[in-house]
Amino acid sequence: MDPGAVRRTLQPTASPKDITGSTPYDSFVVSGLRFDAAEHGRVLCSFVVTPRLACPQGYLLSGVTATLADQLGSAVFYSSGVGFSGVSLEISVSYVDTATIGEEIEVEAKLLRAGKSVGVVSVDFRKKRTGKLMAQARHTKYLALSSKL
C-alpha cells in the first residue's frame, strides 16, 4: 500500500474547468480535505465545514457528504492494493445528524469486502470534537477490469 498514491487520488491537481471526466463539484468538495492516515483497507480524512460547503442556514450540504462518500470510497480501494477504483454500482447515505459551519468532521472509510468483481466500502462521518456519528454511507463498486456486458 502506497499512502502517497492514496493521497494523490484525493488531491485536486487542476482547476475544476480543466478536469475531464469529473464534475467541478468533486474538485470543489475535495479542496480543503485533509488526508490524516491510510492503512490497508482504511482511509482517514478530516475537514472543517466552511460557508462554501453549507446551505444558507449554515448546515453542511448533503451533496458534500455524498460526494465525499464517493471519493473516499474509491480511495479505499487504492489503499487496499486493488490498484483501480472500479465503477460505482450504488451509494447510499444515512444522515443522522447535522454539522454546522466551523465544525470539524472526521471521515473514516473502511473496506468491507473486495471480491473478484464487486467491492463494498463503509464511510463514517463523525463530529471530531464529540465523536458523534453525523452520517454513514455504503459504497458498492464493480471492480472487474473488463466485462462481457
Image (cartoon, grey):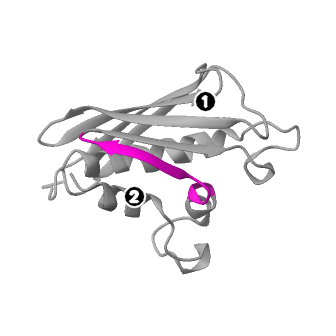
Which residue sits at x=20%, y=51%? 1
Q: Can you give x and y, in whole percent of width and height, for residue 112 in the image? A: 27, 29
Q: Amino acid at mark 1?
A: Lys
Against 90, is 23 above or below? below
Label 1 crowd (10 A; few <14 / some 14-19 / many >=20): some
Which residue sits at x=53%, y=77%? 14
Q: Which residue is mark 1?
A: 128
Spatial CA span between label 1 and label 2: 21 Å
Residue 68 lies left or right of residue 148; in this view the side is right
Residue 94: give its label: none
Q: Can you give x and y, in whole percent of width and height, for residue 9 in the image? A: 39, 61
Q: Which residue is mark 2?
A: 7
Which stretch did the figure color magenta?
A: 29-40
Q: Secondary structure at mark 2?
A: helix
Residue 70 lies left or right of residue 125; in this view the side is left
Q: Secondary structure at mark 1?
A: loop
Which residue sits at x=81%, y=43%? 55
Location of residue 28 (image quadrant): bottom right
Q: Earlier in the sequence, mark 1 or mark 2?
A: 2
Q: Amino acid at mark 2?
A: Arg
Against 93, is 30 above or below? below
| Residue 31 shown in magenta | yes
Which residue sits furthest bottom?
18
Q: Can you give x and y, in whole percent of width and height, for residue 141 in the image? A: 30, 43
